[in-house]
Amino acid sequence: MKWIFLFLGVLFFSGCDILQFEEDKAKMIAQEKIAFEKKIKESKEIQLKKLSAQTQKDLAILESKRELALIEKEKELPKSACKRR
């Protein structure tokens, strides 16, 4: 019976950080911090790439609209010149 209580006690405390050394905890925290910062950096880079792609797309759309407007005006010029003569 004593062995069962001893086994259950060891099993219960094995999941706790009681037996873990402070250096191990500090290393683990440092590794988690580095991983978290890396994930944030990657997330920021992805967001910047998406923003850049969207900006390029918007610029292309504006450029095409400007070119279409110029073509429309060029088409109207000869018509209005002919009407005046």
Image (cartoon, helix red, strand yellow):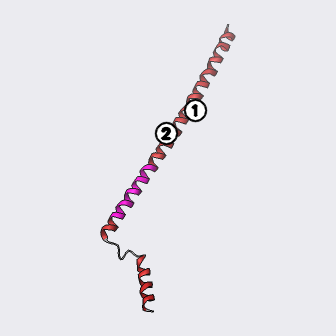
On residue 61, the disc is 1
Q: Main secondary structure of the magenta part?
A: helix
- Is residue 39 found inside the magenta-colored segment of the image? yes
| Left or right of 73, for residue 59 | left
Q: Nearer the viewer, residue 63 or 39?
A: 39
Q: Earlier in the sequence, mark 2 or mark 1?
A: 2
Q: Nearer the viewer, residue 4 or 14?
A: 4
Is 42 drawn above or below residue 32 in the view shown?
A: above
In the rendered image, which quarter is residue 77 located in?
top right
Given the image, on which type of amino acid does mark 1 rest?
Answer: Ile
Residue at point 44%, 49% (across, down): 42
Given the image, on which type of amino acid does mark 2 rest?
Answer: Ser
- Judged from the image, the secondary structure of the residue bearing numbered disc 1 is helix
Residue 67 location (% of width, % of height): 58, 24
Quadrant the N terminus occupies? bottom left
The residue singled out by tag 2 in the image is 52
Residue at point 33%, 63% (across, down): 27
Residue at point 42%, 91% (across, down): 2
Q: CA distance from mark 2 to mark 1?
A: 14 Å
Quadrant the C terminus occupies? top right
